[in-house]
Amino acid sequence: MAIRGPSIELHRPAPLLSGGRGETCLQKKPFLVQAKRLGGLEKASTRGAQESGQPKKRAPLIRGTVSPPLPVPGNIPRPPYVGTKDAPEIAKEIQMHDKESIVHMRAACELAARVLEYAGTLVKPSVTTDEIDKAVHKMIIDAGAYPSPLGYGGFPKSVCTSVNECMCHGIPDSRELQDGDIINIDVTVYLNGYHGDTSKTFLCGEVDEASKRLVKVTEECLLRGISSCKHGTSFKKIGRRISEHAERHGFGVVECFVGHGVGRIFHSEPIIYHQRNNRPGQMVEGQTFTIEPILSMGSTDCDMWDDGWTAVTTDGSLAAQFEHTILITRTGAEILTKC
């Protein structure tokens, strides 16, 4: 589950104008990498659009009816934030693990991965995101775990479901999935005192080639970011790797949502930026954190719905996200949220 990132000093190349290969406009403004400034989604002739065609036109995302939160049996331990109205501050603590706590982290992350895989099988036209939430909730509590999003800062559901132009934190509701939609499902479980956090963007029915390409490149960006990780590596290398690959394919990296440390605490340091940045600090063996890039076909700036959670692209362009929780080792990174 991504968190909103604080403002930082960014390092960007000069604006890239690549002629017949399309245009990518990298602005100097914090939290903004916008194709929209070139004249809207229809006029942003990115290389990705030229190679794969324009995405099909969709009606804007409209919220449905949100049902009440689902109950959790009293014997299942709750995270400390449950029952409080405000989301906790990002903890300054760097979450390090010994052999015993790594066992607990693996168990939580493996459960999250299995739940996410199951949730993906439910993605079909006419299925509602509320139905997905109910199925995910049941699988989590049946495993003796707590769905971490439920009650976090007042979030009313057990999973985040972000459809089409929704960047992240979509609230499950009565809207039926449509043929050609893309949907990110973000699962976090709290098991034996540890959080496991993961997400994936799924295709619903027959999806156009441009949307498939966005989803494919977003997953590739995540894996490239992970491949840069090991003990002693600078955190800023993650953002560089992700940005290079996204730009090569004509997509923008959303800057206002970040990865984070995860373990006993849901959201902690280190903050993981997915774009070029000058963040100090190096990875240390035994750390766990998430990498969760969001890519957009157009604007990377967001509008927030009045529910305080749902973040959508300002120009209605599609966005995709993938996420893993990883463990830093001496020689690389272990993906914990992998079935």
Image: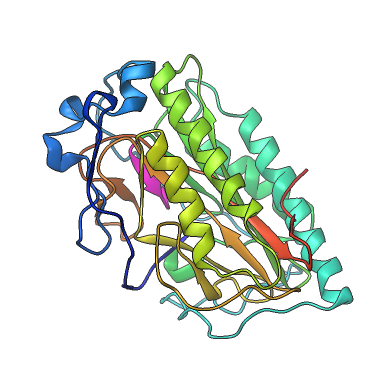
Q: Is residue 174 visible?
A: no
Asked if the magenta segment contains residue 168, the reply would be yes
In the rendered structure, the answer to whether residue 130 lies left or right of residue 287 reads left
The colour scheme used to paint the residues is rainbow
The residue located at (82%, 74%) in the rendering is 101
The residue located at (18%, 25%) in the rendering is 42
Q: Where is residue 311 in the image (x, y as percent from the top left)?
A: 32, 51
Quick one: 265 or 12, which is closer to the camera? 12
Mainly helix, strand or loop, the magenta region?
loop
Question: With respect to residue 60, does 136 lie above or below?
Answer: below
Q: Position of residue 225 (x, y in %)?
A: 57, 52
- Which quadrant would residue 333 be assigned to in this image? bottom right
Q: Can residue 309 be seen in this view?
A: yes
Q: Where is residue 98 in the image (x, y as percent from the top left)?
A: 83, 78
Which residue is most to the left? Answer: 39
Which residue is most to the bottom? Answer: 92
- Which quadrant would residue 5 be assigned to in this image? bottom left
- Which quadrant would residue 135 be assigned to in this image? top right
- Please identify the quadrant where the C terminus is shown: top right
Q: What stretch is highlighted in magenta?
A: 165-172
In the rendered structure, the answer to whether residue 129 lies left or right of residue 308 reads right
Q: Where is residue 157 in the image (x, y as percent from the top left)?
A: 50, 54
Asked if the magenta segment contains residue 310, the reply would be no
The residue located at (43%, 17%) in the rendering is 209
Quick one: 22 or 36, which is closer to the camera? 22
In the rendered structure, the answer to whether residue 13 lies left or right of residue 133 reads left
Question: With respect to residue 279, does 147 lie above or below?
Answer: above
How many numbered circles are shown? 0
The residue located at (32%, 66%) in the rendering is 10
Quick one: 274 or 102, which is closer to the camera? 274
